[in-house]
Image: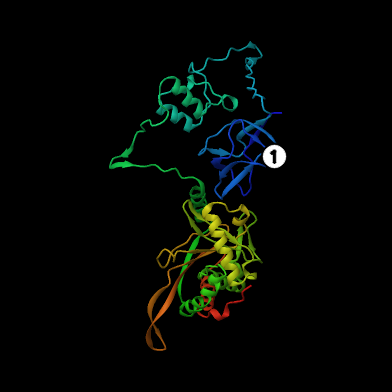
Amino acid sequence: MVIEFKFPDVGEGITEGEIVKWEVKEGDKVSEHQTIAKVETDKAVVEIPSPKAGTILKIYHREGDIVKVGETLVTIGESGETIEKPEVKTPLPSTSVVGILEEAPPATSKPGVLATPATRRLAKDLAVDVSQVIGTGLEGRVTEEDVRKFAEKKGKKPEGFIRKKLYDLYGYYEAVPMKGVRRSTAKRMVESVKAAPHVTHMDEADATELVKMREKQKDSAQKKGIHLTYLPFVIKAVVAALKQYPYLNSSVNDENEQIILKKYYNIGVAVDTEDGLIVPVVKGADQKSLLHLAQEIQSLAEKARSREIDLADLKGGTFTITNIGFIGGTHATPIINYPETAILATGRIYDKAVVVNGQITVRKVMPLSLSFDHRVIDGVMGARFMNAIVRYLEDPSLICLEAE
């Protein structure tokens, strides 16, 4: 039995994805649940399994194509089966109370052609009249493969053709499509700024003792294969402060006009990847030791950069931390990971001359920037929350150092 397998709803409000790689080709036999394609959504790269065993009779998209949820990916059947073309029904003429009305002739003599914008661009580049191409896609859709085959028959070279350079008044430029993670991030940032009035509070923590403590712990962690950064210490400080100021560990339900105070502590950690920022979430951060946190952060970051992270690892955050310090810079104005209500940015630890007990001395300083939703958190609460974080970072003995 021939079935059309459509791009499924993979959850998290995802409506489309880009086909990164086909794991099968037309004519291949597949088993049930075998991966047939890898699709990059705005969250992660997901594997699409075959819903049944059979033979891949038709693939409807090329690698790099954007597919919407509900669009047909492949047709699966038995070897030797063919795909039936849909019957084209001739519409009945319109009628009225005085008899039959003749339909007005179409404005153009050429029938409408089903083809994606990308296919039409390819046809234009190859000087192919797309209306002359017989479509082999779903419901007679003209595919890029159809255009290329038509061009070959007419002596056109489908590869290596010259594309027109883009230029404006001042010179040439390149147009880079915004897609995948970057496209999703752009949408979420705009949504966040529109929905939540942002306020950013900045401060610094004397990290001298923290630097010493990390140096003592670093070697023993390394022997266990764990790279101990400052981030686990910051997470511990943040969680302790969140317990004192629960409104920063919340989200807003705009529909019901409610503030949802979370009783769990799932900390999102922004990871820089080639495709843009991805924010894996460390679940139950309050229940984990420093070394456990470091190990989990390391694992999640590696999965995020390789785009092999599970969608479950990107959900459920209550507060986000972004570290700009490893690149450079001090303070920033981070955008809230909506619908959370706050985000903390940590800057580069640097040497600073400060006055201690009336004497000028050099201390290690960590810049901190806290952005929060002013609908939920006022300036005083934000400042008090920041003071609590500073206190824990300046006296790291307050932070639990238990290791598993």
In-front residue for pair 284/98: 284
Q: Residue at x 39, y 76 (%)?
A: 351
Question: Which quarter of the image is occupied by the C terminus?
Answer: bottom right
Given the current orientation, which residue lies at the most extreme left position? 170
Residue 253 in percent (x, y) is at 62, 57
Mark yes or no: residue 244 visible: yes
Q: Tell me: residue 45, above or below residue 99.
A: below
Can residue 375 be seen here? The reply is no
> Image point 63% across, 36% down: which residue?
6
> Would residue 314 be found to the left or right of residue 163 on screen?
right
Q: Tell me which corner region of the image, top left, top right, bottom left or bottom right, holds residue 385.
A: bottom right
Q: Secondary structure at mark 1?
A: loop
| In the image: residue 258, left or right of residue 178 | right
Classify 10 Å Cα crowding around label 1: few (below 14), some (14-19), many (20 and above): few
Q: Tell me where residue 258 appears, x and y as whole percent.
A: 64, 60
Q: Quadrant of the N terminus?
A: top right
Q: Nearer the viewer, residue 286 or 241?
A: 286
Q: Which residue is situated farthest in the right direction here?
A: 1
Image coords of residue 284 (percent x, y):
64, 66
* Residue 23, quarter of picture: top right
Find the residue positioned furthest to the front: 223
| Colour scheme of the rendered structure | rainbow
Residue occupying image coordinates x 61% and y 69%: 246
User: Mark 1 sits on what residue?
Assistant: 32
| Residue that sits furthest to the bottom in the current view | 358
Q: In this picture, is 373 found above or below 2?
A: below
Check disc 1 and give the amino acid type: Glu
Q: How many marks?
A: 1
